[in-house]
Amino acid sequence: METFRDLSTSKKILHIAGGVVAAAAVAMVMKKIFFRRAAREANPRDLVILRQVGRGPYAPSMSPFPLKLETFLRMAKIPYQSVHSLKMSSKGKTPWIQYNDDDVADSAFCVDYLNDKFGVDLNANLSRQQRAVARAFEKMVEEGTLYWSLALYRWVYPDDRSLVKKSLGIPFFVFWMISRAVRKAAWAQGTGRHSVEEVDRIMEADLTAIADFLDDKMFMFGDTPTEVDCCLFGMFCQFRYNLRGLKPEKVFEKFPKLINYCDRIKTLYWPDWDDKITHGKFSGVGRKTVIREEVFRP
């Protein structure tokens, strides 16, 4: 068999072009399966429709962001209906919301929209300095090593994959494609350039900082929950429930104050927790499957 080096220039071009076409074909298939733009459906008027993928195995979502947004809706006492499917937002992500004729993508922008639309402000009692600290914690959790350690342990590091594969119903080839994409994204972001031991060290330092600030308070800023508590709860639930047997779960167990904090929010705002998890089974959401839950009225 000829090696690539021995081929003529024209044959090399043909080989490269063939590879590009094959890669493009794979990308198109992935897009059709996982990133289909949602066609507008007939939804109830004046009701928030929370769009997300299926329920998680031991926490209501396998992603911190849908859980953050759904917890916010409950804290803010905004009625909503959760709809589960593989239909993504205009940004190709989940969660997103629909309200009458409006579509809003990205959990942070969804919170801003809901605050404006329903006159809600969970941060009303925070000072400017406290709001600044809250934003810093949110960015550290959602865009820093805590999020990327979750992504790396779930998709890249050589650990047990049975839970994520079973819960999401992912075949090997699709898992491999997602793993490859996460590896590249984590490298570009920076966390993926660290060794596993270095990621663990940064992850533990981040959790230490949050635990030190929380101390013995009920919530991050006292006896009343704020938006940052929704953010932290969404992430902590992944460490505590949906990374069973993996290093992040073991690291999180070193922080009893964070465990109690997570359990406290769960008890207060998720009395139906056991009904909103799959108990380790497949979520039931496939390419053509839409699960529309009953309206939740806090």
Image (tube, rainbow, N blue to C red):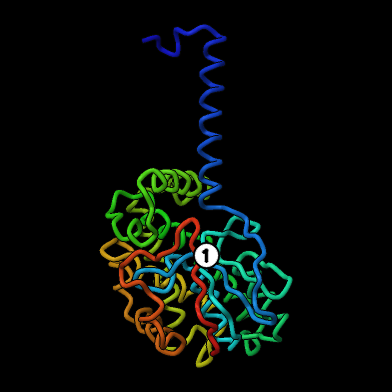
Q: Nearer the viewer, residue 82 or 180?
A: 82
Relative to 162, say whether 64 is above or below.
below
Q: Would you place residue 224 above or below residue 286 in this image?
A: below
The one of 224 and 133 positioned closer to us in this rendering: 224
Q: Residue at x 35, y 69 (%)?
A: 57
| Kind of element beneath mark 1 | helix
Which residue lies at the image location 72% right of the left edge and 70% below the top edge? Answer: 102
Residue 251 or residue 202, whichever sits in front: 251
Residue 104 falls in image quadrant: bottom right
Q: Amino acid at mark 1?
A: Glu
Q: Position of residue 177 (x, y in %)?
A: 44, 44
Measured as percent of width and height from the top left, residue 159 is found at 28, 53
**Residue 197 in the figure: left or right of residue 269:** left
* Figure quadrant of residue 240: bottom left
Q: Residues within 10 Å of mark 1 (few under 14, many from 20)?
A: some
Q: Quadrant of the C terminus?
A: bottom right
The residue to which callout 1 is attached is 142
Q: Residue furthest bottom?
A: 223
Tell me what residue is drawn at x 55 percent, y 74 percent.
69
Quarter location, residue 126 = bottom right
Q: What residue appears at the point 49 percent right and 73 percent down from the top-left corner?
A: 67
Left or right, residue 56 beside residue 31: left
Quadrant of the image containing the N terminus = top left
Q: Position of residue 235 (x, y in %)?
A: 45, 70
